[in-house]
Amino acid sequence: MKTSGAPPDGKSVEQLDRAVIFLGPPGAGKGTQAKELARSYRVPHLSTGDMLRENIAKGTPLGVQAQPIMARGELVPDSLVLKMVADRIERPDCSHGFVFDGFPRTVAQAQYLGQLLKAHGFRRPAVIHFVIDTSLVLRRITGRWMCKVGGEIYNIYERQPKVPGRCDNDGGELEQRPDDREEIVAPRLAAYEKMTAPLAAYYRRLGLLHTVDAAKSVDTVTQQVLAIVRGAH
Ligand code: AP5
């Protein structure tokens, strides 16, 4: 790691200079931790779910194609997702690394990402697998509220805003995601098991996989993630 520039959590002066990939089921806490890590290292948080939701909100051609698929809890086809990601990491703010949350989600996406990172001259990514029991994930998903403005994530059980219904950061209105309805959570979990869970073995074989106990508190998971990122070579 380079040792100048961004100060993670105000204590160190490391730069990320790599991709960090968060892998784990819906509701495991990937978005919560990705925002934290990205803030600490001052690099972009690249959530393909957020990017797709932005496209839906703007009514772009990509958003129009993705909307019914996401509403059913299925994965958006690789052909749509890969171009969106490739375009995003071309942008200058990605030059010192970035945190992927929700990407890659298929072996084909992982293979493509490997080529993309090589082509951009990045060293090997750190892949962090969020391990958690399904019963806990269901509670987290159904309790989640998000800020309409900045996307900050709250939870009615575990992480309440100071003012009910309003974001602590920017006062934005909080809303629930349409795909967090109970009947959509089951297909999302099934898609994860079938298409995404095999990536843990894929990255383990490449020697890139690290594991966190995602059932712990937000602060404890943050410490686990930071220890991995600082120690990864
Ligand atoms: P996406 O937006 O990526 O959703 P996801 O992967 O299903 O993950 P979630 O956002 O539900 O959960 P999370 O792990 O980020 O948890 P969070 O931090 O919010 O994808 C949505 C859809 O987009 C997909 O279904 C698919 O259709 C499409 N898509 C996206 N990427 C794609 C791709 N690459 N290819 C194809 N299709 C794609 O936390 C959850 C809750 O728990 C929150 O309320 C939070 O406050 C709380 N919480 C978090 N951590 C803790 C903790 N440690 N203790 C207690 N509570 C906690």
Image (cartoon, rainbow, N blue to C red):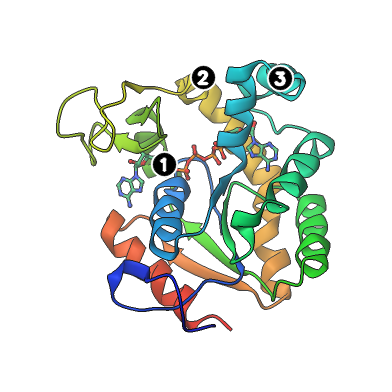
Circle nearer the N terminus (3, 1): 3
Label 1, on which residue?
Answer: 137
**Callout in the foreground (3, 2):** 3
For the C terminus, the quadrant is: bottom right
In the rendered image, which residue does mark 2 sit on?
A: 183
Q: Please tell me in which quadrant of the rendered image residue 93 appears.
A: bottom right
User: Mark 2 or mark 3, which is nearer the start of the sequence?
Assistant: 3
Q: Which numbered disc, 3 or 1, marks the residue closer to the eye? A: 3
Give the side of residue 163 with respect to residue 228, left or right: left
Q: Position of residue 98 (x, y in %)?
A: 57, 59
Whether the residue carrying mark 1 lies under 8 Å from ligand 1 is answered with yes
Compute the Cα span from label 2 to label 1.
14 Å
Q: Secondary structure at mark 2?
A: helix
Callout 3 crowding tier (Cα within 10 Å): few <14, some 14–19, many ≥20: few
Disc marking residue 157 = none
Q: Position of residue 41 (x, y in %)?
A: 44, 65
Tag on residue 60?
3
Specify the amino acid type for callout 3: Thr
